[in-house]
Image (spheres, rainbow, N blue to C red):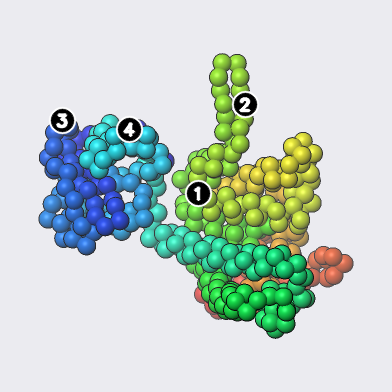
């Protein structure tokens, strides 16, 4: 978010209030006189209307809504500047007693001329597309969870214990004599839905796996996946939520953007930290909390950190939020400074990259064997030591040599 912009010196100041089926458009000059009286324009007619009525000397403000990026892409080439306002932070509109479209336009125009629009970053198209894709995955997961919960409620209702095959064991459901015919029909349909949703989610996960080693995202994804608890789903969710790490001058800004920062109450001599703000990208919070739970199971360092905070707080969910916040700080460092994990040895990193390579499909490894890919990942991370053999869990582990991988990279056209 940016505030205090220099927004003076434009020919016209336009505000677009976007609705489901139409936009309300209005404009002032610097003297706050109407140069474009508020009017409704249907969404389907807006592209043609915009070309005829919006000019190169205009500055435009619009709020974050469902259609914001479609409208932004239409307007941006036509005007001098476009600002996208964070709808949640346009307090004058949210708290207004008089709530009409025209008043909304006037308030947006006041913020625009005053240079105090709570501006949001405009993601490039590839970030927007992948954000929408990870959002689609989240909806599939939610749908799967809802179906599973409905099936679990039937188990509780009839006091039944599942077979070892689990919820998808249709034959077991059919054998249950105390489940009515109507309930069995529901169960059959729920199972069909669940299987289809899981199939769709698997296809989405395979695409995210491909994206995690692609030229566009591969280097950044590897930087994050070196951290314990971070796999390709979490890595890609984090990357598209952040968009561009250079937007955050320090780790504190990134923590604030995620909504994991603690709220503070300051009054007189009283200074008290409250619960996390949750003012930020929800998917980023989900991803780092998910990674934190895994990290405390996999890493002695993060486990010790968690137990230290748990002993003080006595509440697991609060302690894990602290770990998630620290993990997000680590993510800022490995992305912005291209550092390796300071809490991991080179052998730790080698093992993590070997585990990662085992989880990837052959096509996702970009023509490399799993031993070659693990070494390739270490090279991308900047690990200079040519580790080819180490022991983990009393088992010898092997990686390809640096020389072998560099030769193979040259054959495949992969960059170092």
Please tell me whether mark 4 or mark 2 is closer to you in this view. 4
Say which mark, if any, is on residue 281: 1
Which of the pair 143/206 is nearer the observer?
143
Residue 349 lies, with reference to residue 60, above or below; the image says below
Q: Give how far apart the Cα atoms at labels 2 and 3 are.
A: 44 Å
Q: Is residue 12 visible?
A: yes
Q: Give how far apart the Cα atoms at labels 4 and 2 are.
A: 32 Å
Looking at the image, which residue is at 28% across and 31% down?
114
Query: Considering the numbered disc 4 on the image, is that residue within a helix, a strand or a loop?
Result: loop
Which of the pair 312/120 is nearer the observer?
312
Q: Give how far apart the Cα atoms at labels 1 and 3 are.
A: 37 Å
Q: Earlier in the sequence, mark 2 or mark 3?
A: 3
Quadrant where the N terminus sits is top left
Q: Earlier in the sequence, mark 1 or mark 4?
A: 4
Looking at the image, which residue is at 15% across and 36% down?
29
Residue 358, position as x, y percentages in the image? 69, 73
Name of the residue lying farthest toward the right: 394
Looking at the image, which residue is at 57% across and 77% down?
189
Residue at the spot of label 2: 272
Q: Earlier in the sequence, mark 4 or mark 3?
A: 3
Disc 2 crowd rating (10 Å Cα; few below 14, some 14-19, many 20+) is: few
Residue at the spot of label 4: 97
Q: Give how far apart the Cα atoms at labels 4 and 3 are.
A: 25 Å
Residue at the spot of label 3: 31
Q: Earlier in the sequence, mark 4 or mark 2?
A: 4
């Amino acid at each position: 978010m940016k505030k205090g912009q220099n927004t003076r010196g434009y020919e016209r100041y336009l505000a677009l209030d976007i609705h489901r089926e139409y936009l309300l458009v209005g404009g002032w000059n610097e003297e706050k006189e109407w140069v474009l009286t508020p009017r409704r324009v249907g969404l389907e007619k807006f592209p043609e209307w915009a070309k005829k009525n919006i000019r190169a000397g205009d500055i435009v403000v619009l709020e974050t809504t469902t259609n914001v990026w479609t409208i932004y892409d239409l307007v941006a080439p036509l005007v001098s500047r476009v600002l996208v306002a964070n709808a949640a932070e346009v307090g004058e509109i949210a708290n207004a007693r008089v709530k009409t479209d025209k008043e909304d336009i006037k308030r947006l125009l006041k913020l625009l001329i005053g240079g105090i629009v709570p501006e949001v970053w405009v993601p490039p198209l590839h970030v927007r597309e992948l954000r929408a894709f990870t959002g689609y995955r989240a909806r599939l997961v939610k749908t799967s969870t809802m179906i599973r919960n409905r099936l679990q409620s039937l188990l509780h209702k009839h006091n039944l214990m599942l077979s070892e095959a689990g919820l998808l064991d249709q034959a077991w459901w059919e054998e249950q004599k105390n489940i009515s015919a109507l309930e069995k029909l529901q169960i059959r349909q729920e199972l069909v839905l669940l299987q289809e949703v899981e199939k769709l989610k698997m296809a989405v996960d395979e695409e995210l796996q491909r994206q995690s080693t692609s030229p566009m995202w591969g280097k950044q994804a590897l930087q994050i996946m070196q951290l314990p608890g971070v796999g390709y789903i979490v890595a890609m969710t984090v990357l598209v939520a952040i968009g561009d790490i250079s937007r955050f001058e320090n780790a504190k800004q990134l923590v604030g953007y995620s909504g994991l920062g603690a709220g503070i109450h300051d009054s007189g001599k009283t200074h008290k930290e409250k619960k996390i703000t949750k003012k930020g990208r929800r998917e980023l919070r989900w991803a780092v909390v998910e990674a934190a739970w895994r990290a405390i199971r996999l890493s002695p360092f993060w486990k010790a950190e968690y137990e230290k905070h748990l002993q003080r707080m006595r509440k697991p969910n609060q302690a894990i939020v602290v770990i998630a916040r620290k993990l997000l700080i680590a993510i800022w460092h490995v992305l912005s400074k291209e550092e390796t994990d300071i809490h991991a040895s080179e052998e730790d990193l080698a093992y993590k990259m070997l585990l990662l390579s085992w989880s990837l499909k052959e096509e996702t490894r970009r023509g490399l064997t799993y031993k070659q890919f693990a070494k390739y990942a270490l090279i991308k991370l900047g690990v200079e030591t040519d580790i080819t053999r180490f022991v983990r869990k009393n088992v010898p582990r092997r990686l390809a040599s640096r020389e072998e991988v560099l030769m193979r990279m040259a054959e495949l056209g992969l960059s170092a």
